[in-house]
Amino acid sequence: MCWRDFHHQVLAARPEASRRDYRPRHDRWRTEDEAAEDVAAWREGRTGYPIVDAALRQLLHEGWMHNRARLLAASFLAKTLYVDWRVGARHFLDLLVDGDLVNNQLNWQWIAGTGTDSRPNRVLNPVRQGLRYDPSGAYVRRWVPELEGVEGRNVHTPWRLPEGRRAALDYPAPLLDLTEGLVRFQHARGLG
């Protein structure tokens, strides 16, 4: 409730923050057109990262997802794929049954590192987050049925399965290596 009230106060003082960066970082985000294939895969829950895909498929099916899932999906789009946060914010508002312009926009800016946050370079690793918050893989298996038969924690890294087992899954390879995404983000932010 405190974050909700805080965001309402921020937007009341700075209404332009619903469309513009609260704290510009001079990002050169990829636009929706520049990243069309990546954005489509993200929206459909076909990124190749099971916890991210589970979150986005839940959103498509239920119009809702847990806050941790929202953070992971947003971090993946804005930081790993380096796509403008407004693309994701618009998608969430289109589908969330509990969508609220104020909290949606400012939470997207928080994860993108352009909001009121003091840690703008935080990047959530979807593999580590999956292992930490879905250690048994139950959430992933519920929303990504292609991985239902993958044993244990391997469900979070299906690309590491033996080739024959991997080839039998109707699940995409990761859109990009996480290290590659992190390097792109750090370079764009002037950190690396």
Image (tube, rainbow, N blue to C red):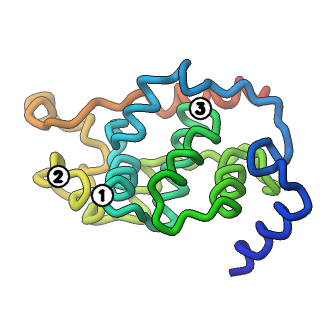
Of callouts 1 and 2, the N-terminal one: 1
Badge 3 element: loop
Instruction: Give the residue at x 84% y 38%.
Output: 24
What kind of residue is marked 3?
Val
Q: Work out which quarter of the rendered image holds the N terminus and state it.
A: bottom right
Instruction: Give the residue at x 28% y 57%.
Output: 140
Give the CA separation, mark 1 to mark 2.
13 Å
Q: Nearer the viewer, residue 131 or 110?
A: 110
Q: Nearer the viewer, residue 143 or 130?
A: 143
Q: Which residue is mark 3?
A: 83
Quadrant in the rendering for residue 30:
top right
Badge 2 element: helix
Question: Closer to us: mark 1 or mark 2?
Answer: 1
Q: Nearer the viewer, residue 145 or 12?
A: 12
Q: Which residue is mark 1?
A: 61
Q: Nearer the viewer, residue 82 or 122?
A: 82
What kind of residue is marked 2?
Pro
Residue 67 lies, with reference to residue 85, above or below; the image says below
Badge 1 element: helix
Q: Position of residue 138 (x, y in %)?
A: 25, 65
What kind of residue is marked 1?
His
Give the CA separation, mark 3 to mark 1.
23 Å
Of callouts 3 and 2, the N-terminal one: 3
Q: Position of residue 7 (x, y in %)?
A: 77, 66
36 to the left or right of 83: left
Crowdedness near tag 1: few (<14), some (14–19) or many (≥20) residues, C-alpha within 10 Å: few
Residue found at the far right of this picture: 13
Residue found at the far top of this picture: 34
Q: Which residue is mark 2?
A: 145
Q: Position of residue 128 (x, y in %)?
A: 45, 52
184 to the left or right of 102: left
Residue found at the far bottom of this picture: 1
